[in-house]
Amino acid sequence: MLNVQVVEGPPTEVQTFDEEDLAHRLTDHDVEVIREIFRTPLTGSYNWDYEAANSKIRRLYELGKRFNWNAELDVDWNQPAPPVPTGAAEEGPEGFVDHPKWKALTPAQRLEFMARSQAQTLSQFLHGEQGALMVASQLVSCAPTHDAKLYAASQTFDEARHVEVFHRYLMERCRMIYPINPNLKALLDKVLTDERWDLKFIGMQILIEGLALAAFQTIKEQTRDPVLRDVLELVMRDEGRHVAFGVNYLEDWIRSLPQNEVEERAQFAYEACVVMRNRLVSTTVAEEFGFTREEALEINNASQGGAAFRKFLFERMIPNLKRVGLLTESARPKFEELGVLEFENLQDDGMIDWATLEAPLNKRAPLAA
């Protein structure tokens, strides 16, 4: 029986799962669907010229077809999980270990803190990928060219796999899902409900996908779980194609816009960067264990891990914004104030690293019949 519940906003409580919940996934038990409705003045278009007009976009589309992977078959879910998500229990998360409140926690509480911290981070990956899934599906309708519609269709399938694989990891390895960060939700809502197709491209292909790549790279370097490492490697391959698609498709389009419209898009990109730099840090888990929000923010801002994430984020995003023409003269002082213009001359994704994107996937051997 399908029980549909319409809500005004996303859940605010942590969902937890036990063995019985996992068993129910394979049975005909009642399913509750929780829906939050949004409306958008999306303008779609047919395209009656079916010829390929952009060889780079078509090549990226072909790579998407060639390198499809299957979360059920290409990830070995039976690999043993490490006892601690990152680092040893006595070490704890960077920045917290010297704090008196951390020292007051029992060993069991420290383990739980670290497990919940990882679950909270990966939950944002899950929610972000659902947003990417819906935006990619919108782009199929509103992208103006045949090549872009084909690529957006292939990206929609990529994002569906990403939702699937992160949901499975959270269910089976973390056994909990945290609510979406309100600032991430606001950014996704803005991209989903805006009527301008190119703002959707900017928001999704350059900003949100750039955010995802930075977060995935940071976790991949930290995790001791081989399953999570395998998952992130597969997902990052897809995301690399998505960012390359966005940069190559947008650069000519934005140059053709009137300057006032370019400035509107540059302002949107700046505001999104502010959110990503300052407001996507979660303090939820730390507050569950007695830290104040201010203490948790101070620890994160001072940590090497937090700095590494911000570096990964902007050293890829800022060159791409420059490539497509959104580091305008009026916007530059705002980006300078954020302290991110130091990255503007690094390599952008307009020059596609075909060797990396075309390298064979590290997939599991087929299971014996």
Image (spheres, grey):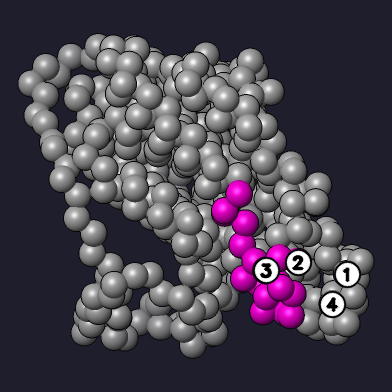
Whole-number angstrom distance, CA of label 4 to CA of label 1: 5 Å
Identify the residue under disc 3. Answer: 293
Q: At label 3, which amino acid type do we have?
A: Arg
Whole-number angstrom distance, CA of label 3 to CA of label 2: 5 Å
Which marked residue is nearer to the observer: mark 2 or mark 1?
A: 2
Circle 4/circle 3 CB separation < 8 Å: no
Q: Is residue 229 visible?
A: yes
Q: Residue at x 49, y 79 (%)?
A: 13
In screen coordinates, is 121 left or right of 186?
A: right
Whole-number angstrom distance, CA of label 2 to CA of label 4: 10 Å
Circle 3/circle 2 CB separation < 8 Å: yes
Q: Residue at x 19, y 55 (%)?
A: 39
Identify the residue under disc 2. Answer: 295
Circle 2/circle 4 CB separation < 8 Å: yes
Identify the residue under disc 1. Answer: 99
Which marked residue is nearer to the observer: mark 1 or mark 3?
A: 3
Placement of 360 over or under 91, stated as above or below: above
In screen coordinates, is 164 left or right of 334?
A: left
Q: Quadrant of the N terminus?
A: bottom left
The segment highlighted magenta reads 278-295
Placement of 103 over or under 162, stated as above or below: below
Q: At label 4, which amino acid type do we have?
A: Lys
